[in-house]
Image (cartoon, coloured by chain):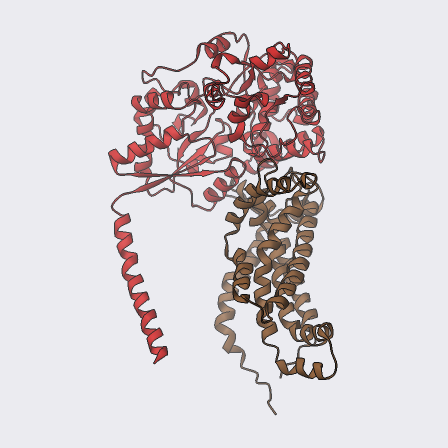
Chain colours: A red, B brown
Amino acid sequence: MKKKLVASLLCGIMTVGAVTVPAGAVQASEGTTITVMASQDWVYDAEMELGKQFEEETGIKVDYQIVPADQYYNMLMTKLNSGEGPDIFGGQSGSFDIVSQYNVEENAVDLSDQAWVSTYDEFAKAQTSVGDKVYRMTYYDVSTDYYVVYNKKIFEENGLEVPTTYAEFEEVCQTLLDNGVTPIYEPCADGWHQTMWFTEIGGKYEELVPGIVDDLNNNKIKFADVPELKEALDQLNDMAQKGYFGDNYLSDEYTDLLMYLGTGEYAMALEKPGQIAAIVEASDGTYTEDDFGMFVIPLLDNDVYPQHPCGPSRFVYSGSEHQEEAKQYLEYIASADSVQYMIDNCDKIENLPFDVGQTPSYSEATQTFLDAAEKEGTVFQDSIKYLNPQWTELTQDIVSMFIGDMTSEDVLNAIDERRATQAEAVGDENWQ
Amino acid sequence: MKKSKIYPWYFAAGALLIYTALSVVPGIIGIGYSFTDWSAYSSELHFVGLQNFIDVFSGDQDYLQYILNTLLFTVVTTVAKTGLGLLFALALSRNIKAKNFHRGVMYMPSVLSILIIGLVFTSILNPKNGLLNEGLRLVGLDAFTQKWLTDPQIAFWSVMGVDIWRGTGYIMTILIVGILAIPNVYYEAAGIDGANGFHKFVYVTLPMLKQTLAVTIVLNVLYGLKVFDMVYALTNGGPGHRTEVMYTAVFKQFSQGLYAAGTTISSVMFIFMVIVGFFMIKILTKDEVIE
């Protein structure tokens, strides 16, 4: 009797389950959901708000899948390589690597016929195209880059001037450290930020070693052959060893950067100029925007302003069942209203690479800083083939250097090995 | 007298067929791909002989260190989970108050998603504001605060510690079942012979638990050799490459589109696990008698 009762109950549950599942399926088919997969900090809150507005207007729901930066590329490539990519995926490399890294001709949809392409910035377009086909939309402020943002008040209190050489920079850091201020907030935990110290000064490398970009791209020289690259890594390591990043830099997270600069606990950090407003907000009235300034990364006495035309971008996955909806979303976020909305509601975005009549939000200080640029050069992750795809591994190697497991030579050799592996896999004739 | 009954082989044919199709064949195909240059970047496959295996064992790419890390993880977590699991199983198989509640609490971590555990422990082990260091500071044990997941000397031990916390309850549950299956008559007989608690454990419990222990050890060893998600969620192989294990390396190779390299490491691990599993079962069940 008892057994019969249990069996009847189970049958009942199964029947209800069988009826419920199709009911859910019917409901799901009423509206489409597109997935946008991106690395942490590539999709801002303002864009998610646009996503909600897009849903209200079109009925298409946008599901943002944000992945920690140090895991993003591995996870994305696993999905793409196994044929299970999201409808829209984020990517970061330039025209060289979108073929070798993302295999866009296979994995992404040609977006050349989309209306927004006519308003797309030519500089950004060149980096996001293969031949005459546009494969992605850069949705990031590429008009500015990461600079050393410093606290002017702390500098004044410690009698410090803006450094123009690495020696001066070291002196500034040491003085701050001696006076109880941690010089630099360097969030290593996220697995991407620290590598910029090395790659952002691509313009300086080109100035010091003329032809280095072409020679590296044509495999005439290797990273390990260039003493200047070793010196830059040594200087970066020196900063970590001397305590300029503080005690907990390996655990520090990028999301806390605003807070720590806002409290004045740290005096400097690599950050985009648009974030100064957010740092001020995080300071709870202690500082104003006038209390912060910027200078370029001073490793190797760098004075070349970085140009970084390849910001985080959006691809439409070729295997997506919702390609049209995904294209519709891109069209929506590139509209004049959306672009202005992003500029007005996101500190990091002072402009977007579209010409839709928007008004950029550069502060006077940012404009003055940018106007002061006498020399400009493209960052290495954009100009050097097979470098950006190994960002996660390179970042891990740099941490290995910080903890003494690798030397700067080891890091450079590892870069060369990975470049060779990828170039050979791609069949690059310069590596044959 | 009961004679053992040997069933005809075709009784296992269905299971063998499924096992062969889903496990053996992919394994063999994977081993085959290890001898090629298979990648996401080219549709052509070329035979490269033993090159991929040479790369793994040549020491150029730190794989040997990853193998050692994997073995260390396996040994430490197996010993700790089995030891602690046995200890808790002995305690919670007695008639103590609220034993089911305690069993439930102990078992709970093993039903949680490893990725969720990873996220929670990343926060708990944060050196600045994590629960563990805050707790230590609160009770005046500041000297014991650590950078649990970023200190190169400690990070791997932290990962193993979290895994031991997660897996002990599961092992405990299996062992409780084993202990409860031991007929009470053996303990009564031992008691009449004057055996104390320790003697009963050594001469009754342990021998009778041998098969169950063998199962838990094999499970732990194979889990340890295959470990990926715990390391991935807590440290992603860092700081630097200090906590990298074989399957995080496989994951990184696959995600870079270097399939052959990833398959090679998988194949090495596959063969290694088959050998380890085979010998462990042989050794741990050598006294087993079919009745």
Residue A163 coordinates in the image, percent (x, y) = 63, 11
Residue B211 coordinates in the image, percent (x, y) = 64, 72
Quadrant of residue A380 within the rendered picture: top right
Residue B22 coordinates in the image, percent (x, y) = 50, 61
- In the rendered image, the quadrant that contains the C terminus of chain B is bottom right
Quadrant of residue A357 within the rendered picture: top left
Residue drawn at point x = 46 percent, y = 10 percent: A367
Say whether residue A117 is left or right of residue A423: left
Residue drawn at point x = 48 percent, y = 8 percent: A368
Residue drawn at point x = 25 percent, y = 52 percent: A26
Say whether residue A340 is left or right of residue A260: left
Residue A186 coordinates in the image, percent (x, y) = 59, 27
Q: Nearer the viewer, residue A201 or B139?
A: B139
Q: Nearer the viewer, residue A274 or A372?
A: A274
Quadrant of residue B86 within the rendered picture: bottom right
Q: Is residue B35 visible?
A: no
Q: Is residue A276 visible?
A: yes
> For the view shown, which residue lies furthest in the bottom direction?
B1
Say whether residue A128 is left or right of residue A74: left
Q: Nearer the viewer, residue B76 or A228?
A: B76
Say if B206 sits above or below A291 in the image. Answer: below
Say if A170 sits above or below A91 in the image. Answer: above
Say if B151 sits above or below B191 in the image. Answer: above
Q: Nearer the viewer, residue A19 or B124?
A: B124
- In the rendered image, the quadrant that contains the N terminus of chain B is bottom right
| Numbered label tally | 0
